[in-house]
Amino acid sequence: MTLIDCLHVCNPWWRGDGVEPDLLHQTIRSEFAQIVKELGGEKTIALAGPRGGGKTTLLFQAVHYLLQMKVPRERILFFSGDDPSLFIHNLHAQDVVMAYCTGVLREEPELLAQPVYVLIDEAHRVRGWRLFVQRCREKGWRFRFLVAAPMPQLLFPPGSEALQEKARLCSVAPLCAPQFLEFYCTYHEADFDHAAYKSRLPGFDVFAQPEAYARALREQAGALEPFRAGKRNILNQYLLAGGYPGYFAARDMAAWHRRLFDEMIEHSLYSDLLSNYAIKSPEKLKKLLYYLAFLEGREQAYAGIGKYLSLNTVTVMHHLRLLSDDRIAVVCEYYKENMAGVLRKNKRFYLRDCGMKHALLHRNTFTPEEHARACREAVLTMLFEFAEKNGGRVWYWRSAKKQAVFVLERRGQMLPVQFLTGLDAGQESPRALQSFCRAFSHTGGLVITRETLDVRGGVTYIPLWML
């Protein structure tokens, strides 16, 4: 099979077939709007996120969108770096694109009459793709690039800062709870009227303006009440299943956890991390993943993890950085006003996806305490994503009575967040948040509750099911 034959197989729309429906989800996640916004521009669009998170689907949805926008079908080129039929002879990206220009488009790169859209999945496995993108930019060739890889560091390693400055990075993490709700309602239309529910929610993020968000909810409280039971049922599914879109094709939770473990965890570790970084003890990296699931956000020091894994602290920090870069884990540091104090304090470690954690722990049901932790981690996932997208950072702080407050720091402002959703839900006041405000001369904050919706004393109270 020639290179051109392989490309024809990868691009069935050239022969008028369009994108196969199985390659497109029944709904489109919110990150697609950012892709559409940048498609007509000069910047390279770079998708980064863990395996199974939806990057490839977004690429094919972009192809589908371009076809709907009447872009000539032969001017859309897709190929993947893990396609052995294309790269068995160690071809460079330039070889593939030049062969396409000659054998399919029949135009010279410097004489393109209209833009050509080049979509590269697993771009980090394609030799010379960065050099080719840079060459196209320098020569003014009318190629528009959309590339995907598991993490930004694989797309833009040290030395490629100039290319990164001219790229638009889009993080594609597993679905958070609101995105999961939208997907769920698309696949199970009769269960929940998502359009009606969403129309009653504020049109801005709760972490941006919590007090205004709560006041808007109070105006719609009566209209939202009929959705309470359904929303909680869907949320409980999310807490066990997690946010990988493949869940909606699974037949049951046990089968999904097996698939999540086999395909996402094993493949992400061995295909994405171990094959791209010099890790001497791959079994220790896998053991670290298990240990993070076991910790469930409890405080721990790097040295303590190293002792458990028989690794030095530097290696532990390196492994955790890789898991963090691959959007698998999150390291949450202690909030103090001096950095020396931050470095000395223990950290809190979380797996980014709750379904991955439960797959590792073989957990298909919850105790009340486990459910409370899962609820907290679901909101933390939303908080981490909001911070990343808005140039912020999330810390934790602990009161004298060991109760935790999470601190969103953004644009010089702080938002302390406390959870009263589990065994402490009957507590009259958020004592840890109040202790934080006294310690740092701060006013206001957000409390995630089981039932209470209110604004009093400068503190906003919002039920988990209304987020």
Image (cartoon, helix red, strand yellow):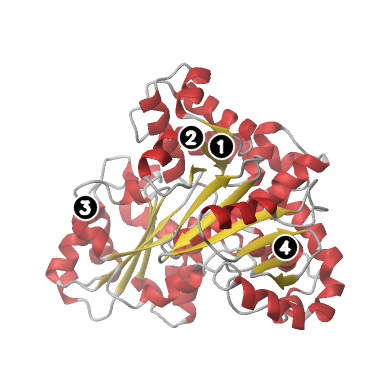
Whichever of callouts 4 and 1 sits on the residue coming sooner in the sequence is 4
Who is closer to the viewer here, 39 or 346?
Answer: 346
Q: CA distance from mark 4 to mark 1?
A: 23 Å
Q: CA distance from mark 3 to mark 2?
A: 25 Å
Residue under label 2? 269
Who is closer to the viewer here, 3 or 125?
Answer: 125
Residue under label 1? 265
Residue under label 4? 184
Q: Dots 4 and 2: beta carbons under 8 Å?
A: no
Position of residue 57 in the picture relative to residue 185 (left or right): left
Question: What's the residue type where badge 1 is placed?
Answer: Ile
Q: CA distance from mark 3 to mark 4?
A: 39 Å
Whether residue 272 is visible, yes or no, is: no
> Would you identify the image quadrant in which residue 373 lies?
top right
Task: Where is residue 88? Give x, y as percent.
Answer: 32, 40
Q: Dots 3 and 4: beta carbons under 8 Å?
A: no
Whichever of callouts 1 and 3 sits on the residue coming sooner in the sequence is 3
| Residue appearing at x 71%, y 66% in the figure | 461
Disc 1 crowd, CA 10 A, few/some/many (<14, 14-19, 20+):
many
Position of residue 69 in the picture relative to residue 241 (left or right): left
